[in-house]
Amino acid sequence: MENRTSKYNIHNGRGIASNITELIGNTPLVRLNKIGSGLKAEIILKLESFNPTHSAKDRPALYMIKKAEQEGKLIPGSIVIESTSGNTGIALAAVCAAKGYRLMLTMPENFSVERRRLLRLLGAELVLTPAELGMQGAIEKAAELKAKLPQAFIPNQFENPANPESHYKTTAEEIWRDTDGKVDILVAGVGTGGTISGIARGLKAAKPSIRIIAVEPAESPVISGGEPQPHLIQGIGAGFIPRILSLELIDKVIRVPGKEAVNMALRLAREEGIMAGISSGAALWAALETAKQAENSGKLIVAIMPDSGERYLSSLPLGD
C-alpha cells in the first residue's frame, strides 16, 4: 500500500497525524465561572495543557528545531543541548524523540520531581545545577557542555527568535480567531519572554488598543527593577530579563506573591475542575486583580495557562 500522510487538524477533529508534532497547537479557550463570579470583566483561560506534552512550550520547541534543520544546524544523529525550567525540556524531549536527536538538558535541582521523571521517560539526559544559581546556572552549564561537544546545537530558548515567532504565528492567531477579535486584555507570565512577546506582537498588530499585562513573582521582581530572589512560581521569573522579551509591547507588570499563585492553582482545580500549574495560578491571580478595576468593566481578558497541575503534585500543599 502506498505511504500517505495527512495533516491532522485537531481544531476540527479530522484526519490522522503523521507524528506527534502535528498535534501541537489549537488549544481551547474556556470561561472562568465560579472563581470569576460577580466580576464585571470576563476572564477566558487559554489552556496550553492541551498540547501533546501538556504545556505551551511545545510550540517553541518545534519551531526552534525546525528552524535549525532548515539552517543546516541539525542533521540526523545531532546532539541538542538546552537549559530548561522543565517544560521546554519535556517538549524538546518529545520533539527530539520523534525526530531521532540525542538530547542533553540542564535544569535547577529545586524544580519538581515530576518534571525530572518525565524528562528521563522521554529519553533525555539530565544535568542538575545548584538551586541558588537559578536559571542562569543552568544556562552556564549548557554552555559548558556545548564547549565539550562543539557539533552540538543549543536552541537557546531565552534568545532564539523562533521562540516568540511560534506564538506570533500560532497562539496569537488562535486567540484572535476564537474570541472573534473581541479580546481586550492579555495576561501572561514571563519566563523566557517568548509567549508574551509573540502573542503581544500578533494581537497588537490586529488590534492596537489591546493591553498586555506581564506577570512576575513578587519575590523576584526583575522586570519591575527589583533583585532576583528564590520564589515559588516555577516556570516564570528566571532572575534576569531575557533578550527576546519585547518590553516595549508590555503595558503593565503585575507582581504576584508565590503563596497566592499556589492557592489560585488549587482553587482552579477544586472550583473549576481545571488542573493547571503554579504559573497558571499566578496569571489567574493577576487577571482577577485586573478584572476588579473599574476601567476594565465589560472587557474580555484572556489569561494564558501555560501547563498542567500534574507537573506540580509534589510541590502543592494537598494535605496528604
Image (spheres, rainbow, N blue to C red):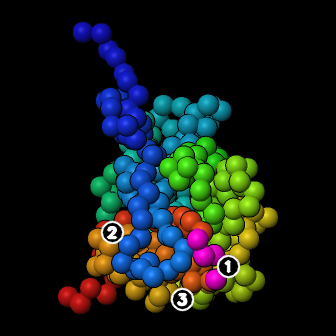
Q: Position of residue 254 (x, y in %)?
A: 64, 81
Q: Quadrant of the N terminus?
A: top left
Q: Earlier in the sequence, mark 3 or mark 1?
A: 3
- What secondary structure is found at the residue carrying circle 1? helix
Residue ID for mark 3:
257
Residue ID for mark 1:
295
Q: Amino acid at mark 1?
A: Glu
Q: Position of residue 195 (x, y in %)?
A: 59, 58
Considering the whole magenta stretch, tell me its main secondary structure: helix
- What secondary structure is found at the residue carrying circle 2? loop
Residue bounds of the magenta highlight: 294-298
Can residue 148 be seen by looking at this rendering? no
Residue at 51 percent across and 38 percent down: it is: 78
Q: Position of residue 151 (x, y in %)?
A: 60, 41
Above or below, 105 against 258 in this view is above
Q: Position of residue 281 (x, y in %)?
A: 45, 77
- Asked if residue 296 is among those painted magenta in the image, a careful observer would answer yes
Residue at 59 percent across and 89 percent down: it is: 219
Closer to the camera, 246 or 64?
A: 246
Q: Earlier in the sequence, mark 3 or mark 2?
A: 3
Residue ID for mark 2:
274
The span from disc 3 to disc 2 (Cα, nearest Å) is 21 Å
Q: How many marks?
A: 3
User: In the rendered view, does 196 fall on the left or right side of 233?
Assistant: right
- Asked if residue 207 is among those painted magenta in the image, a careful observer would answer no
Residue at 54 percent across and 46 percent down: it is: 177
Q: Are marks 3 and 2 in contact (CB under 8 Å)?
A: no
